[in-house]
Amino acid sequence: MIRKLQQGKLVLSTLIGLAILWPGTTAHCSTPSAGNTTDWVLAGAGDFCSYGTFPSSFTTALDTNPDLAYQNQTTNQVALWLMKDQLSPVTATQPAGVVVLPAVPASSLRLGAVAAFNSYHQSDLIFQDMSTGAVTIWMMTSVHVSSTVTVAPSGGGSITIPSGNTLFGTADMDNDGVPDLLFQSDPTNSSGSTITVWYMNNSGTTKGTAVVGTMPAQYVVARAAGTVSRKPYIFFQNSSTGALSGWKLTGTTVSSSWSYSTSAPSGYTLSAAGDFNKDGYLDLVLCNMTSGTGSTGKCVFYLNSTMSSVSSSAYLLNTFDANLTAATSGANVNLSWSATNSELSGTGTITYDVWRLSAGSYTKLTSTSQSGTTFTDTAPPSGTNVYTVTDTLTTSGSTTSDYSPHACPAAPAIASLLPSGNVYAMTFDDDFDQDYGRGLAAIDPTKWVSGYSDGASNHGGGDLGWFVPSALSMNTGGLTLSVTGVDATHPTLYDAGLVTSYASASGSPQFSQAGGVFEICAQMPTSSYNINASYWMRGTFGWPPEIDVYEIYPTWANQDSQHLSGLSYVDQTLHYGVNPSPLAITNKATPWVGTSADAASAFHTYDAYWEPPVGSTAGKIRYYVDGVLTYTLNDSDISPYTIPAEAQFLYIMLSPKGSSAPGAHYNVQYARAWVVRS
């Protein structure tokens, strides 16, 4: 749930409860009544933080998370809720995440489906003209409308939806990688309703139609369909009993069907489908659009453990709450809002946080989450201030899962230095400080494993670390890797911290990537410790290759010609060639020489932009420290070898190098990766 208002400036928005304040007065416009929550109808799920060619003034990145698209049934406006990948309360530096599109569809256009046509994973909006039967696609560039297309046959002419049929969703019915449009005839017909498909090209033209099958009477498909592992699925609900069912299809043939043992809560309607918890199964979203129930506007996610069984559920808290109000009292701004409905708290509690957006920056005003529904901002800065209230559901002393909207993920810190026109699709993101904020006492097991990728704690060959989970800790600053002392069973080795994103031994996690931008924000141990702190990537098919985003040796008595010792130096190395005689080329960057800063004085960002060779285009790796280019490595520098092209996985490592290593602490705020599209 997010409630938002803006002080001191007129804002055109009807999605969130809005009060308009003029400094120095106590008057405020009344907010919409609670009944307006039924105006907003969930129309589908798709990814709007995605690939595309963005305007120069707009930078964003793909996060692969299904976002929610709503349409207001009174004003016809469209709103996008940009969703976080995991179920967690808002703990980031900003609680943004709701976008009301400035373009308003014509009054006859009903948002019937969401799907990606002209760009991989970039979702578009599909409308049905309820007057003419025509279908219009808004081709999207992230949250911007880039063009509109009226669907027509590829050979020319026109096509319209037969009277009584409703656009309800999309799925790739002919396995060509392009979503196809699905329609349902009147579900109240006693003999059942017909499901029809329009086969689509990615340009928005049709290449044929077919009948898929007959749905039982009273069963309604409400924007719930999708494609997983190249197989289309359709989900539907009995409008009388609330019972949920599903079809798996092979082409237009129903290859299997099932009924869920879990029924929809009373008053909740099947509204969308998407893989919200990223387990490879489509999850169902049901929303309550019944007026006057106390649950109006709320949505629940049914998370499938298989495609045909519900394992758990989670609520989208107070999707549309129009009761945030504000008034000025002298220099103060007094906020008040309604409590979250009791059905969501169960045996737990709901707490609230208040945020203020001023001059482009968010400030969290509540030092600790509060249970009360009023707040006074005693020091609002001059100018325009936007206030937002977020809530968190807590049960039995620990924060439980809830879906909250978030902003699109950031582009890399070095984005402005890279070729213009690049679009960054985030493929890996772990904000360790946020992990700690949502209650994780250890590394996220879906993203990292302790030790080497093969499960070993030591690889020999002069390796002095015995890498164990006890040398890893979470705190308000993020992840800390430590050297804790001599290992109890290996007296020549030291217990130390190492994490990897690829576990070949256990099978999870499995993140690796060929090419893109790899970034970390970290603070090194001080010079009193003989260690190597590093962030590097190793090939999934053996070593070499290895790309070191950085290695830093505060003190290393046995340094060799490939490395420099000292916190003012950053080693950026590519290991290449073949065993048993691998090669290496190292840049000895000096980003802080001559300044008072060094790698231990603060957190710094380190990036590698890796471009594998493709066809006749040579490979390249560009290295950066704090957004400054430090080194460019080309194919020609390592001839006859080339820049690696195979996928690599991530290592964050604190490696002991001698007896002074114990006591070292290596702090990491986040690690991220992007693929790049030009």
Image (cartoon, rainbow, N blue to C red):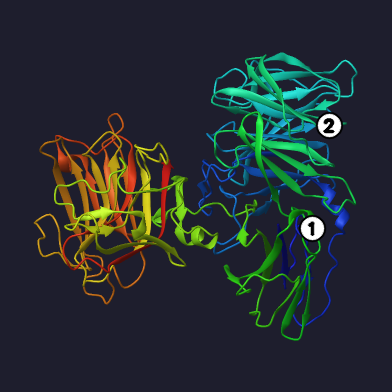
Whole-angstrom CA distance, mark 2 to mark 1, is 38 Å
Which label's residue is closer to the chain start, 2 or 1? 2
Determine whether the residue tagged by mark 2 lies in a helix, strand or loop: loop
Question: Quick check: 38 left or right of 498?
Answer: right
Q: Mark 1, residues whose alpha carbon is within 10 Å: few (<14), some, or many (≥20)? A: few
Q: On the rendered structure, is 649 left or right of 254?
A: left
Q: What secondary structure is found at the residue carrying circle 1?
A: helix
**Quadrant of the rendered structure where residue 22 is?**
bottom right
Q: Nearer the viewer, residue 253 or 21?
A: 253
132 is higher (above) or lower (below) than 636? above
Residue 564, x across and y down, in percent: 15, 62
Quarter of the figure with the C terminus? top left
Q: Nearer the viewer, residue 180 or 129?
A: 180
Looking at the image, residue 233 lies above or below residue 353: above
In percent of width and height, residue 465 lies at 23, 55
Nearer to us: label 2 or label 1? 1
Q: Quadrant of residue 153?
A: top right
Residue 326 numbered tag: none
| Residue 547 horizontal/vertical position (percent) | 26, 46
In front of the other: 48 or 540 = 540
Residue tagged 2: 130
| Residue highlighted by disc 1 | 342
Q: Is residue 295 above or below residue 179?
A: below
